Amino acid sequence: MAARLAARLGGMLVVVWGAATLAFLVLRLVPGDPVDIMLGVEGQASPEAKDAIRADLGLDRPAFEQYLGYLGRVLRGDLGRSYQLRLPVTEVIGQQLAATLELVAASVLFTLVLVAIGAVVFGGRRSRPVVGALELIAISSPPFWIGLVLLAVFGFGLNLFPVAGADGVTAVVLPAATIALPVAGLLGQVLAAGMADARAQPFALTALARGVSAERLVLRHTLRHAALPAVTLTGYIVGSLLGGAVIVESVFGRPGIGRVTLAAITHRDLPVVMGVIILTSVVFVIVNLAVDISYRLIDPRLALSAEAIRGVR
Amino acid sequence: MRLIPSPRRVLATLALVAGTALLVSGCASPQSGAGASTPQAGGTITFAVDVDPVGHLDVHSSQLDINAILQRPVFDSLVSQNADGSIVPWLAKSWSISADGLSYTFDLRTDVKFTDGAPFNAAAVKANFEHIVAPDTQSAQASSMLGGDFYAGTTVVDDHTVRVDFTQPFAPFLHNAAAVQLGFYSPLVLAASADKLKAGGPGISVGTGPFILSSYTPGSELVYTKNPDYNWAPDGAAHQGAAIIDTLDVKILPESAVRTGALTSGQVDIIGDTSPASLAQLGAGYTIISTQSPGVPYSLFLNVKRPVFANLGERLALAEGFDLDAAVKGVFQGRYQRAWSILSPGTPNSYDASLEGSRPFNSGDARALLDAQGWTGRDSEGYRTKDGKRLSARWISYTPVAEDNASLAALIQDGMKKIGFEVKHDVLEPGAYLDAYLAGDYDLTDWGYLSADADILRSHLGTKGFQNASHVSDATVDANLAAAVATTDPAKRAELYRALQQYNADAIATLPLYVPEYSLAAGPGIGGVTVDINGWPQFSAAYTSR
């Protein structure tokens, strides 16, 4: 067990290292000199001044040396300083992390509630196709548009929620709903299809013949069968929300990692981009682990088959 | 100061749908009446803007317009510039200029305090000007406003008298001294936290102004509280003493449709950087203040070092070849004026109105000019050719391009295509843009540049100008620019700038397109908001009766 855990942790580290290395390489391949971009078209620094800035940032050293130096600092927990903001990267990300986590948590909560209503409550009913159509509309609507419509109706029209900012619980409702609607549509479709498949299986007929109620059949049996792909998708979505909520953040004027990342990429603020990539890869790795663990809880056969494979070996 | 276009990550269709959604919501939330207009003390005014200057809050090094707008409540200047361009006393009671034009001596007010308690005096002026020119500050704009290479130093004459010296006469100095870029940080901040000025925030962005920055959430909100001790408003300002409102709350709402909706629903009081399309959506009861931006209007810069624009013929063909009047009228719904000169009408003591109407749309003439240059062949797409080469110009733009400017570009491309001249528009992200720009690998590029002094032409038309995107190099132009910066005689300066505008109108190094405006819209019950020469809001006298 300890060996398996160690192997798993090692694998996770390799993923994070790989992400950081790939990001480092890619950021050096794209055109654009960080110092030129920092100064802009209006910047009138002399070549000497530019060289001084370059030396100050360590950009004058060979790429491989920069890479090794960077890895060394990351291992010591130092993500460097932002070129643009002149603040430690940990502080730049830290300032925005709370708002992002709040948004992700609320979005996941909303998603689960919507999916529970759409797929579980309506699953198998005659009205399910109507819910399915609504889900398709939610999936195919651009988040930007959903955000504006929600704002127009609940923010501007009914004045129920503040337009902008991140203070208080009410400020997170509309942004989280904007993210949750299409995600819930997608998960609902996946889950409903899985449950329909499961219901067609002989075991479902057996259970019903045993006198199991329709509700119990859903909760104990078909939901479990359908849950695996939905859980995988949820894990992926949670991971990508971390840096990927930029549209929602800008519609609602919310602080967050997404906008920080966008600005950092356009300004070639390499330390911040690298910091976000490392953070995202760590979150993905952790979410992936959680998804794997939940697989075994949802479907005990997986654990059994793993034991069986080891037994053969 | 680049006129930053507001970011629009939206497809046109989406904007249309969103606009409809907002119209629907507008019906659901009536905001009635013109609002009571009795000023009452206290309260909060909420001001929504499109972007915040995250990481660029240092007034001495930032080049962002939005930073100048958002820091003005906090930072005062030696003098103040009225909307008509005239200069009045502010933190300096009076000043004198030496006969040779090399020294400016300022007699400072004695009752001014920074909001952290430090006194404002000659030493504070010296510390700030030294901070601007210090290499670590990496200042481009503020340091050039302080004279750049012409700046010799600042001397404390006595506690409240300070002298600024130049190596050669530098006429724009008084105009520049009124700008927030030459505003004053508390010397305590400069001594203790100079490395944090770019990040900014409460306790860092500390000046003598009518407001104190009390909280800053990057990307989201800036909150200012009034400075109760403030008693040093510019001479002749309508409102003297402390601000009327208690709190100014600035919200960052990047999407134009969201700002408009927030205003019409009463969730914010004032919106800034408002496009003509949004203004058209506002009904009665809203106060709209639009100001033509001084400086260089939004223009196309023709790179005269490249073959396609090396000769006057092709440059003239571009100037006459498409219907700019109709394009500007259509794109900006008749709200913006078409530009005729490389200087905006609002630039103090310099604009040459005689250029208006001087080169009207004339596609026949443009065609003849191109024929005369030998572009007589035609390729399969209908473009002109010479020796088998297509007549084509590469236009590079810095992303994001404002929606209105993108529409204008499309109309220009379309008009030029009709006379067989291909204009390829490459919208590049900053890294790629700067690579192309610095290498001179473009035929056209575009921007407008705000400046309250015509000396801005020195960087745009001077051989060594750092914004000389046209790569103009002309001895007479350089001599006129040098003479204009060195004379303090207004009539003489105006004469020289007229000659420079005439030069550009003849040589078409720059093709001015339209005169941008800064527009504010205030909701019912909001009053007292004034604007400076740039059209930027001043909140000292603002009040809310909501």
Image (cartoon, coloured by chain):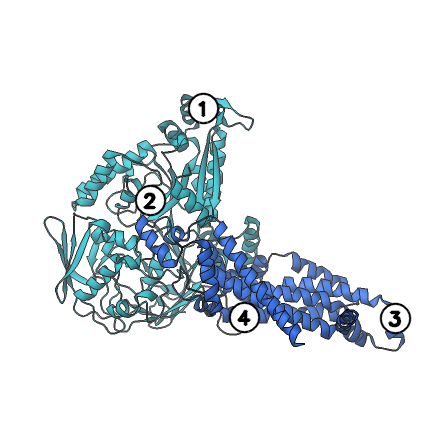
Chain colours: A blue, B cyan
The quarter of the picture where residue A184 lies is: bottom right
**Residue B22, percent from left and from top:** 54, 58
Label at residue B375: 1
User: Which residue corresponds to mark 3?
Assistant: A205
Residue shown at the point (60%, 70%) measured from the top left: A9
- In the rendered image, the residue lying farthest to the right is A209
**Residue B528, percent from left and from top:** 33, 63
**Quadrant where the C terminus of chain B is found in the figure:** bottom left
- Check whether the beta carbons of the residues at disc 2 and disc 1 lie within 8 A of each other: no
Residue shown at the point (65%, 60%) measured from the top left: A138
Q: Is residue B71 above or below residue B511?
A: below
Q: In the figure, is residue A31 to the left or right of B75?
A: right
- Check whether the beta carbons of the residues at disc 4 and disc 1 lie within 8 A of each other: no
Q: Chain of mark 1?
A: B
Category of crowding for the residue at label 1, using alpha-carbon neighbours closer than 10 angstroms: few (below 14), some (14–19), many (at least 20): many
Same-chain status of marks 2 and 1? yes
Label at residue B467: 2
- In the rendered image, the residue lying farthest to the left is B99
Q: Is residue B349 above or below residue B530?
A: above
**Residue B362, percent from left and from top:** 41, 29
Same-chain status of marks 4 and 1? no
The kind of secondary structure element at disc 1 is loop
Res. B57 in view? yes
Q: Chain of mark 4?
A: A
The kind of secondary structure element at disc 2 is loop
User: Which residue corresponds to mark 4?
Assistant: A101
Instruction: State the separation of the CA atoms marked 3 and 2.
Output: 78 Å
